Image (spheres, helix red, strand yellow):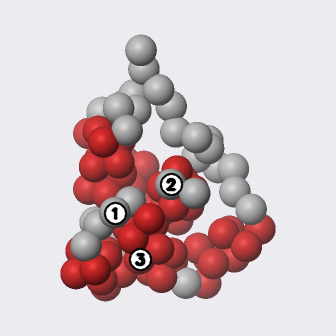
Amino acid sequence: MSKDFKNRLFVCSITDFLMSCFFPNVQALFASDNAGESLLKSIFQCLLYPFLVPFLRNKVRKEKEIEGNVCQDVALGLLCPCCVVIQLKTEFE
C-alpha cells in the first residue's frame, strides 16, 4: 500500500509561507530537526540550503514509505525547495 505525504506540496499556513520566504535556511533547519536528523546534519541543512533538501526529502520518503522516486525528490527539492521544506516540516508535526 503506497502512502502520500500528510500535506500536499503547495498547501501551508501563512506563518510557514512567510518563514520560508524570508528565512528559508532556518525553515530547512527546523524540517531537518523534525525529521530526526542530528544537530550537525541539521546545521549543514541550514548552511547548504537548498542543495541538501532533495536528500532530506528522499530520506523522509523512504522512512515513511511514501510513494515517489529519487528523480521527483531532486526535481522538487531544487525547483521548489521552500515548498518541500514546509511539506517535510509538517510531516512530523
Is the residue under label 3 in contact with that under label 1 (CB below 8 Å)?
no
Is the residue under label 2 in contact with that under label 1 (CB below 8 Å)?
yes
Find numbered disc 3 in the image and state the secondary structure of the residue it sits on: helix
Image mark for residue 92: 2
Q: Amino acid at mark 3?
A: Leu
The residue indicated by pointer 3 is 29
* Image quadrant occupied by the N terminus: top left
Above or below for 2 versus 78: above
How far apart in space, not on screen, are marks 3 and 2 (Cα)?
14 Å
* Labels 3 and 2: the sequence-earlier one: 3
How far apart in space, not on screen, are marks 1 and 3 (Cα)?
11 Å
- Disc 1 vs disc 3: which is toward the camera? 1
Rendering coords of residue 17 (x, y %): 68, 68
The residue lying at 55 percent from left, 84 percent from top is 23
Rendering coords of residue 63 (x, y %): 30, 42
Q: Amino acid at mark 1?
A: Gly
The residue lying at 77 percent from left, 68 percent from top is 14
The residue indicated by pointer 1 is 36
Q: Nearer the viewer, residue 5 or 52?
A: 5
* Image quadrant occupied by the C terminus: bottom right
Number of residues whose C-alpha sits closer than 10 Å to that of mark 2, classed few (under 14), some (14–19) or many (20 or more): few
How far apart in space, not on screen, are marks 1 and 2 (Cα)?
9 Å
